[in-house]
Image (cartoon, coloured by chain):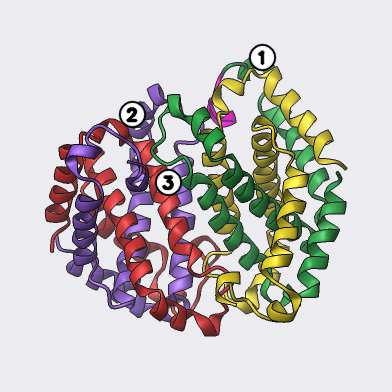
Chain colours: A purple, B red, C yellow, D green
Amino acid sequence: MTIEEITTRICAFRDARDWMQFHNPKELAVAITAEAGELLQHFVWQQPGQIEQRAKEKLPEITDEMADVAILLFELAHNLGVDLGQAMLAKVERNETRYPVAKAKGSNAKYNEL
Amino acid sequence: MTIEEITTRICAFRDARDWMQFHNPKELAVAITAEAGELLQHFVWQQPGQIEQRAKEKLPEITDEMADVAILLFELAHNLGVDLGQAMLAKVERNETRYPVAKAKGSNAKYNEL
Amino acid sequence: MTIEEITTRICAFRDARDWMQFHNPKELAVAITAEAGELLQHFVWQQPGQIEQRAKEKLPEITDEMADVAILLFELAHNLGVDLGQAMLAKVERNETRYPVAKAKGSNAKYNEL
Amino acid sequence: MTIEEITTRICAFRDARDWMQFHNPKELAVAITAEAGELLQHFVWQQPGQIEQRAKEKLPEITDEMADVAILLFELAHNLGVDLGQAMLAKVERNETRYPVAKAKGSNAKYNEL
């Protein structure tokens, strides 16, 4: 499925409800952060050995939160005239320069700490 | 561009660096929330009349943060075996039931407060 | 009430349950962010003219979230050996330099944009 | 140091700059979440064995972020007429009921999963 197809569906849903008036970039950023917080909530206090099991048990809720974040993000990109897919590929390419395999392999250091 | 194509690229980048060891679902949720916070940071204290201008001035940075959140989200969905596109459409459909046009048009109330 | 008195109470609660093992600085930062997200959740999509009313209606829930964030924050500061009150006053003092009244009065610009 | 003393200082700083106009409860909640995200940022991708070392290396920055969150939180509580210290103690007391020592000792389960 393409990002464009899903975005079209999201915008049709929004416009049928006349919600663009509430969806300025700040409000969308606020909603994205709040939904990301709900995603994170499922993992609070979980120890390394419990995480995979947790993710399995809460998969429907986690899927729901991921969908919420992604829906808001696709709409924000669209509203700002940003091609999200291109932006993602451009970022992966930048990360390829920032994190050359020879230096970054097996390391969790940030590019400016490598 | 399809979600699958971009996800393939993200996973190739990750695997070339042997980073799957750091990317359990909790760590990805932590990173998503931290990046969402960076997106939000651009709008802190901005008043309604300043937001569109702000979004324009900071568009490269905002695009970068959106890409970061989306990259992590696509990977998380993939790692959990979730079809993110299907999950998003399923959520839009659920929202169509939760927010019927007749009740939700022009309202910013939550479905349980409509 | 002093920060120290409340912190003593928080640590006694934690230690009676043998929870220090779960409370490393990262886990506390994760929990703080997740609770901040719950606080924010009460204001998502709320328009300027609705916010004061919203805060009144949800005051018990909002108070609860503020308490959650503050409890975790007091513990984190204590665990790191930081005097939170002194750190807060030091930050206010730094902000007095960063935001001189003559330049910052009535402005919501960041210090590096003043 | 008491919460009240520090809050008085924070409000004097704000009022000298005529910033109350920007500090409605939603804006404060947005700023708290964004600052919590900055705190979390210091721990992204950090593995269990690296966290204490990380906290030590980044202590000045972490202290700064904790102070930022706390300053905003103290002001929010004050603006809403909430006695934050009392709210915190009330929450600790509720948690004592929710997490009885006999059941909660050594467990990281949520109260509704105990």
Write down the chain letter for disc 1.
D
Query: Foreground mark, 2 or 1?
Result: 2
Picture quadrant where residue D106 is located: top right
Q: Alpha-carbon neighbours of circle 1 within 10 Å: few (<14), some, or many (≥20)?
A: few
Q: Which residues are magenta?
A: D107-114
Q: Which residue is mark 1?
A: D102
Q: Secondary structure at mark 1?
A: helix
Q: Tell me where residue B79 appears, x and y as whole percent.
A: 24, 39
Q: Can residue A21 be seen in this snapshot?
A: no
Name the kind of residue labelled 3 in the image.
Answer: Leu
Name the kind of residue labelled 1 in the image.
Answer: Ala
Q: Tell me where residue C95 appears, x and y as whole percent.
A: 70, 63
Name the kind of residue labelled 2 in the image.
Answer: Glu
Is D93 situated above or below D65? above
C32 relative position to B31: left or right: right
Q: Tell me where residue C44 appears, x and y as whole percent.
A: 53, 64
Q: Alpha-carbon neighbours of circle 2 within 10 Å: few (<14), some, or many (≥20)?
A: some
Write down the chain letter for disc 2.
A
Q: Which residue is mark 2?
A: A52
Residue reaching furthest to the top? D102
Marker disc for residue A50:
none
In terms of depth relative to the viewer, which is nearer, B85 or D76? D76
Q: Give a yes or no on whether discs 3 and 1 share a subunit.
A: no
Is A6 situated above or below B21? below
Q: In which quadrant will I find the N terminus of chain C?
A: top right
Write down the chain letter for disc 3.
A
Tag 2–tag 1 contact (CB < 8 Å): no
